[in-house]
Image (cartoon, helix red, strand yellow):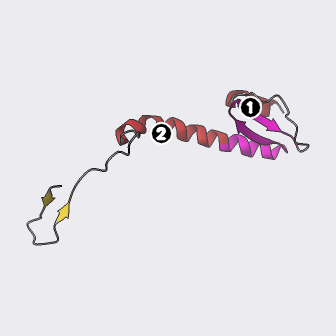
């Protein structure tokens, strides 16, 4: 660790980068996917609001998304993509 002192007689500060945890990715490697992840998260939230306005609930599982009605039954299958959910909600 290299310490740098400013010429103003202040407190010495150590400057170093944040280390990457084992098995993790560097900060630079995560930024390109962040916009896509944020867009997907906002899209899912929007679809949840649209579904709730129609009395439905949007759920996600490993096999895909599903719309659940008030009787807790799937409306149009359980393996829907976000695009299919969006088109289904647009039709209803």
Q: On residue 34, which mark appears? A: 2
Neighbor class of circle 2 (other Cα within 10 Å; few <14, some 14-19, many 20+) is few
Quarter of the figure with residue 78: top right
Quarter of the figure with residue 27: top left
Q: Residue at x 71, y 38 (%)?
A: 60
On-image quarter of the C terminus: top right
Q: Residue at x 78, y 34 (%)?
A: 89
18 to the left or right of 78: left
Residue receiving disc 1: 85
| Depicted 23 relative to depicted 15: above or below | above
Neighbor class of circle 1 (other Cα within 10 Å; few <14, some 14-19, many 20+) is many
27 or 42: which is nearer to us? Answer: 27
Q: Position of residue 8 (x, y in %)?
A: 10, 70
17 to the left or right of 60: left
90 or 31: which is nearer to us? Answer: 31
Q: Residue at x 17, y 71 (%)?
A: 11
Judge whether residue 16 is colored magenta: no
30 to the left or right of 92: left
Q: Position of residue 71 (x, y in %)?
A: 91, 43
Q: Position of residue 20 (x, y in %)?
A: 35, 45
Judge whether residue 53 is colored magenta: yes
Q: Secondary structure at mark 1?
A: helix
Please say if the residues under marks 1 and 2 sit with CB atoms less than 8 Å apart. no
As drawn, the residue found furthest toward the left would be 7
Read off the magenta span.
45-69
User: Which badge, 1 or 2, is on the more N-terminal residue?
Assistant: 2
Q: CA distance from mark 1 to mark 2?
A: 23 Å
Q: Secondary structure at mark 2?
A: helix
Quarter of the figure with residue 66: top right
């Amino acid at each position: 660790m290299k310490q740098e002192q400013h010429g103003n007689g202040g407190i010495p500060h150590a400057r170093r980068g944040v280390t990457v945890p084992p098995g993790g990715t560097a900060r630079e490697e995560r930024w390109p996917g962040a916009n896509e992840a944020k867009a997907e998260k906002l899209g899912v939230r929007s679809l949840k609001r649209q579904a709730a306005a129609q009395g439905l609930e949007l759920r996600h599982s490993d096999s895909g998304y599903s719309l659940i009605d008030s009787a807790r039954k799937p409306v149009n299958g359980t393996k829907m993509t976000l695009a299919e959910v969006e088109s289904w909600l647009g039709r209803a």
